[in-house]
Image (cartoon, rainbow, N blue to C red):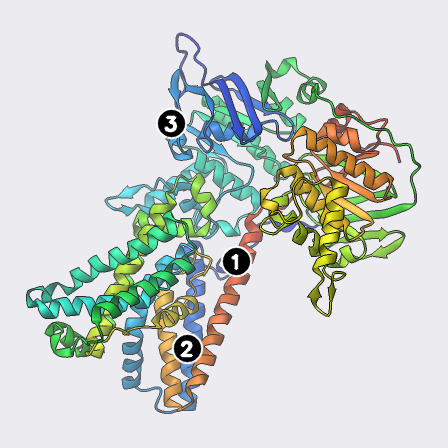
Amino acid sequence: MSVQASSAQPLARLRIEHISKNFEAVRALHDVSFELQPGEIHALIGENGAGKSTLVGIITGLVSADTGTLSLDGTAVSFRNPLEARAAGLAAVYQDPNLFPHLSVAENIFTGQYPRKGLAVDSQTMRRDARALLTKLGFDLDVDRLVASLTVAEAQFVEIARALSSDLRLLILDEPTSALTPGEAQKLYSVVARLKEEGTTVVWISHRMEEIRMLADTVTVLRDGGHVKTLPSSELDDDAMIRLMVGRSVALEAVARVDALGESRLSVRGLSVPGLFDDISFDVHEGEIVGVAGLVGSGRSEIAQAIFGLSPNLLGSIAIDGAAVTPKNPRHMSERGVVYLPEDRDAEGVISTMTITDNIGLPSIKRLNTFGFMKPKKERELAANQRTSLSIKGEVTDLVSSLSGGNRQKVAIGRWLATNPKVLLLDEPTHGIDVGTKAQVHDIMRDLARKHRLAILMISSDMQEVLAVSDRVLVISRGRLAADFDIADATQERILAAASGAGLKEGAE
Amino acid sequence: MTSTSTDQPRKTLPARLGLSGGAAALKVRFIGVIVFLALLGIAFSALTPRFATLDNGRSILFTAAILAVAAVGQAIVVLTGNLDLSVGAIMGMAAYVIYDIAGQNPVLQPYVVVLAILLGAILGAFNGFLVAVLQIPSIVATLGTLSIYRGFVSFYANATEVTSGQLPPWMRMLATASWFGLPAYVWVALAIVITTAVALRVLPWGRKIYAYGSNPKAARFFGLNSTRIIIGAYVAAGIIAAIAGLLLGAQVGNINSLLASGFEMQVLAAVVIGGVSIWGGSGSVYGAAVGAIVLATINNGLVLLQVQEYYRLLIQGAAIVAAVAVDALVQRRIHSATTRRRIMEVVE
């Protein structure tokens, strides 16, 4: 491969200079600059939402930067799509395999750049080259198999094979081992080590401390869209990395709980869904807010969804106000007073083409009709009540699509509050909401717990939010309950350590 | 520990049958359609002695020929995950307009196929433009062009017919000719089916159609130009539909402005029964052609049995629903296999 044989002055493989990117009002990256050296394994770390994925998108041409420049081996580059980046020797393997299930392994590796014989695709060369690439990875796979029949690990290796070209200068792997077994991961480590020897720069994005310690030469930390530090990995231990990842100054105000907790409203024992999570037990009491922390993809949302009746094959037991329930489907659970607000509220939480009134009335339709006819007056009253108590901006006749993210979330909460629930499951309740509205949503949550005696389970990636709102914090790591902290014992460092699997199960209970 | 079986690669059906690879999986589905056709044949043969004769076989193939050609064009569009409801209207327009022009200018008579290719490409490109550039859902876009194209023919025809005397004599002869014991149309259909199949298999154009249909989201990561792929599929479908229109026109002789109206339903049925996934990405034009033969066989057998028309509709409808239901199952399996839902490590 193209080994940069001791050139006179050491040129950076990729120099990232002053890259900034905003998605509407959200600042994804702000003035990020650092360098990747030839033939190194460079770990890119940061919390959920620190800007890693956006940066990868910009490097590979999936996303265009607002400002800033990239230079590859000293030449300024800017790619319009991943194919151009690949032609220049840059490739990325994204977190979710993006392959064509109906096509063969060989076709997947070469789609977009088929070897040709005249006008036609040269199938023989394609299959031979595909086999050669896989062999190079130390992976023996029938190139004629359909991708639909592969395991996740096999699909991942197909993607990596796809990324390998004759002149691969930079390979970016985004959470490559999160779906692999330890044995499969081991295989990947040795592939990466081999690529490094050949002079390829590998960017390794991971949350697993042990991997970073073992593999990385250099570590770059991103936080809130900004560059924090780039250091040789030998100068950083786990604690230091975690500190750099979380060290934030903006604080949300925590309000101490004064009222006593009531009885357990939601009790979960030994809850498992094979392959997703295992043996989860906890209680949420009347008037309590329990935060659920953990990395994206650790199984947090799946737990809430299972409690709401969205998962078949559920094992373990659930009790609502002491009465055992086997969740069948969302309607079954909402009739028992359990409500789930999904993370992607535009897709799942509200119906944006309908008015505030219609949205709020929807789950209460049973109460709002006589002999199948809606009672518009009652519906308006209900909506007006929720609007006032949640201080939703806008008239009840406004379309939800005209509201801001924060107000949409309030509508989503309002429509379920109108059903008088007992247990509220919130998935990333303030994701993508500005700080001001965030605090309002937090006040609403506290109000619901303290005054209305609801039990609230809040999944959040925002560490500040978890610490500010929760009475207790559960940490989920790779489908298991890694820690259960009382809020007094919870710190960002301890939560993150538990989430990354650095510590064993600790904490009270 | 949980019993996540993803560690051991589960054997796919083709693998278990001792076949390997992507082509094999298609073959298995293809075999499914053939088996269905064979069962139909056996059933009809048992019910009436007039079914299993050589003449009747020829008659089935002759009926299936035009439908198979149109189904091949439709299959290309369906492979991208879209639909072309305007196929019947394109056939009607091509037959009426081209034969009318050629009837008035006999110099053009040898070139009717070239004219069909041109007209079909234009009409197909317009469909593709609506779907790919304006991003109108294909079912609505082509429902609209169905009306537009059909309306144009009616306007152009002005309530007159193109009579069989105006058609190029060689096309009339082709419609009734028989080569090597089979109707010439059957050979023409076979040639179009094979050419299209080879083009889809061998040309990058064809591979991209399969790739895009299989996973449009991934196509972006692979740098495929979706606009060009979709327009290309509609252009090919338009050309093939226009040729099918010429064939149908020459067969019926006297052409009015309603030629081939409602044909799209038959065509879609053939494609779906033939195992082309309505979600795109899988199936073959051979399957679509066999789907056409299945429909022709059902029609033929029921006519021989002298059953009422509504039985034909019932059976045809049931076959469509069954084919799509099987597809939906396959699609769900593929989806759950390729979506990453495994979070926990499996301890070894």
Same-subunit check for callouts 2 and 3: no
**Residue behind mark 1:** B331
Res A358 label: none
Task: Please tell me whether residue A450 is drawn above or below residue A5 in the rendered image.
Answer: below
Mark 1 vs mark 3, CA separation in Å: 36 Å
As helix, strand or loop, the secondary structure at mark 2 comes to helix
Which residue corresponds to the image point at 39% horizontal and 71% vertical from the top-left? B265
One can see residue A283 in this view: yes
The amino acid marked with disc number 1 is Gln
Q: Residues within 10 Å of mark 1 (few under 14, many from 20)?
A: many
Camera-side residue: A231 or A52?
A: A52
The amino acid marked with disc number 3 is Ala
Residue B256 position within the rendered picture, expressed as x and y whole percent measured from the top left:
23, 76
Which residue corresponds to the image point at 38% horizontal and 31% vertical from the top-left? A84
Please state the chain letter of the residue tagged with numbered disc 3 in the rendered image. Answer: A
**Residue behind mark 3:** A88
One can see residue A303 in this view: no
